[in-house]
C-alpha cells in the first residue's frame, strides 16, 4: 500500500532555485505586460518554462537565466 501523493505549491522566492544565502540562482522569462501587474497586485505569473510565482525582484544585467526559459524563448524568436 502506498501513500497518496500531494502536490504542494513552490514556496521558494520567485519560484526560482536558490543558493544557500537565499539569492535566486536563476531568473525566468515572463510576459512583459504581466510583470508590472504582478509586482503591484501580487498576481502570479507563468514563466516560459512553466514556473508559477509572484514577481518580487527584477534581475540585474548579467543575471543567470533559467535554461528552460531560454530554450523556449529561442524557439519562439528564431
Image (cartoon, rainbow, N blue to C red):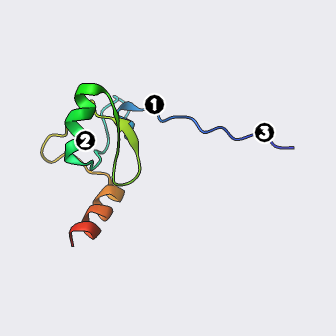
Q: Is residue 36 above or below residue 76?
A: above
Residue 42: give its label: none
Q: Position of residue 43 (x, y in %)?
A: 33, 32
**What residue did someone put label 2 on?**
34
* Quadrant including the N terminus: top right
Q: Contact, CB < 8 Å: mark 3 with mark 1? A: no
**What residue did someone put label 3 on?**
3
The answer to whether 54 appears left or right of 64 in the picture is right
Disc 3 element: loop
Query: Which class describes the residues within 10 Å of circle 1: few (<14), some (14-19), or many (20+)?
Result: few
Q: Contact, CB < 8 Å: mark 3 with mark 2? A: no
Q: Earlier in the sequence, mark 3 or mark 2?
A: 3
The answer to whether 65 appears left or right of 16 in the picture is left
Front-most of 30 and 59?
30
Disc 2 element: helix
- What whole-number distance in Å separates the C-alpha atoms at marks 3 and 2? 38 Å
Query: Which class describes the residues within 10 Å of circle 2: few (<14), some (14-19), or many (20+)?
Result: some
Q: Position of residue 73 (x, y in %)?
A: 26, 62
Q: Earlier in the sequence, mark 1 or mark 2?
A: 1
Front-most of 33 and 23?
33
Q: Contact, CB < 8 Å: mark 1 with mark 2? A: no
At horizontal 28% and vertical 44% (from top left) the residue drawn is 27
Q: Position of residue 22 (x, y in %)?
A: 34, 29
At horizontal 29% and vertical 47% (from top left) the residue drawn is 28
Disc 1 element: loop
**What residue did someone put label 1 on?**
11
Amino acid at each position: 500500500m502506498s501513500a497518496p501523493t500531494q502536490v504542494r505549491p513552490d514556496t521558494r522566492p520567485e519560484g526560482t532555485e536558490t543558493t544557500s544565502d537565499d539569492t535566486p540562482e536563476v531568473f525566468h522569462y515572463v510576459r512583459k505586460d504581466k510583470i508590472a501587474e504582478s509586482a503591484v497586485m501580487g498576481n502570479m505569473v507563468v514563466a516560459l518554462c512553466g514556473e508559477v510565482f509572484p514577481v518580487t525582484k527584477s534581475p540585474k544585467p548579467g543575471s543567470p537565466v533559467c535554461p528552460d526559459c531560454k530554450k523556449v524563448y529561442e524557439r519562439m524568436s528564431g
